[in-house]
Image (cartoon, helix red, strand yellow):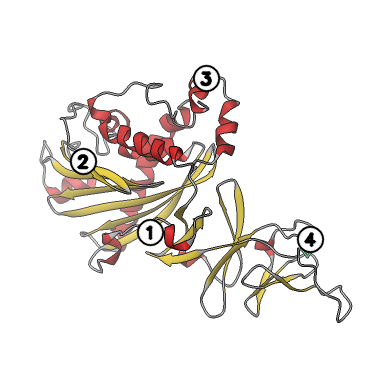
Amino acid sequence: MFKNFWYAVEFSDRISETPCLVKAFNQEFAVYRTAAGKVLAMDNRCVHRGAALANGTVNDNCLTCPYHGWKFDSSGKCVDIPANPAGMSIPNRAKVSTYDVVEKYGWIWLFWGDLPIDERPPIPELPHFYNPDLKAISGDFNWSANYERIVENGLDIAHAPFVHAGAFGNPDAPEVAEYELEIQPDGAGTTVMLEPTPPGGIWRFLLGNNKKADRVKTRTAFILPNITVLEVHLSFGMLAIYTSHVPIDAQTTVSKWVSFRSFFKGGWADRDSRKRVINIFEQDRPVVESQRPQQIPFDLGAELHVQSDALPLQYRKMRLELRDRGWFMGKTQAEGKAETDRHDYALTE
Ligand code: FES
């Protein structure tokens, strides 16, 4: 996991005046909305006896612990200890850590790191979220895998014919032509023409009885540290999926996805689209959860790369730069050492 980034950790519409538990980065956060609508995030553990603040209540914009009623204001400072006699001072240490949060694109972005505000990488520009003509649906997908393997899987063009045959990969067209990388300061992507699986089911009915589907323009990209983007230009419209792969711990990830489409905007299409997104993730799951080491090695020579791996390799290079900047959090590296795979020794070099 890399510090010093804004992470989209939860959907905005799930945060209310009832505190919500958000897990990320081996930590737990109590996240809630004040009566004025501002979203706040603080450590989930009460400094008194460690009760979960996410089980508390919000009153007067303060979060009240469910155990002994200590009340914490928006800065995390305890402002009331009900058991104390009137006039007794509150210890200075009665304070929980708070975190900067921003609501944007229907996500809650939490800054995880120690950089001052003016030095932080910005929340990325995500143009599809501004387009009112697109229909959006969203959801979660839980993995028993490190988020980096999941990000990289989203950039791996060559796996589609094998893992997604029948969905969008075509087993009769596994070759990946050399592609150009579009490299940005905060990520990279590529646009390729892919030969999809010939349409079946409802799609064959809607699109005509084509035996061979048209090649589709597909953009695949990542935004550091944990967002993948898939944009598919079909003959009848555009589909784009943005996913924030939230690292819960070194072996657990929740992918928060938003899928946009310019076509078929009815409820039936929402259900169909949701089913398709989940189906794709389910097809990926057994492969991604089987990968070892669970965390991608920092040693670029530890695994083999071929021409079609140019985009995943670019992701590896850019995360290496982040590691060299000192933004990799060593705790998960230490956890990785527990694995016996030889690649884990490369991780700690
Ligand atoms: Fe929170 Fe006692 S544990 S007030």
Residue found 22% across the figure and 45% down from its top: 219
- Name which residue type carries label 1: Pro
Toward which corner of the image does residue 58 lie, by quadrant?
bottom right
- Are discs 4 and 1 less than 8 Å apart at CB? no
Tell which of 209 and 157 is nearer to you.
157
Q: Which residue is mark 4?
A: 48
Classify mark 3: residues with Cα within 10 Å, few (<14), some (14-19) or many (20+): few
Q: Is mark 4 within 8 Å of ligand 1?
A: yes
Dot placed on the residue nearer the N-terminal end, 4 or 1: 4
Name the residue rendered at 52%, 63% in the picture: 100
> Distance of mark 4 from mark 3, alpha carbons?
41 Å
Q: If you read the primary sequence from the N terminus, does the residue marked by circle 2 or circle 4 appear first?
A: 4
| Residue type at the position of mark 3 | Asp
SS class, disc 4: loop
The amino acid marked with disc number 2 is: Gly
Do residues under tags 2 and 4 come within 8 Å of each other at their CB atoms? no
Identify the residue at image location x=64%, y=61%. 97
Picture layout, residue 302 above or below residue 177: above
The secondary structure type at the circle numbered 2 is loop
* Circle 2 crowding by C-alpha within 10 Å: few under 14, some 14–19, many from 20: some
Q: Is residue 66 left or right of residue 314?
A: right
Sequence order check, earlier mark of 3 and 1: 1
Q: Residues within 10 Å of mark 1 (few under 14, many from 20)?
A: few
Numbered label attached to residue 122: 1
Residue 84 on image: x %, y %: 87, 74
Q: Which mark is residue 341?
A: 3
Q: Specify the quadrant of the image occupied by residue 163.
A: top left
Q: Is residue 209 above or below residue 156?
A: below
Query: Which residue, given by chain and number where applicable, does mark 2 sit on?
Result: 200
Query: Label 4, label 1: how many angstroms apart (C-alpha)?
Result: 35 Å
Residue 102 picture location, percent across and down: 46, 66
Asked if the residue under mark 2 is in contact with the one under mark 1, i.e. CB atoms within 8 Å, the reply is no
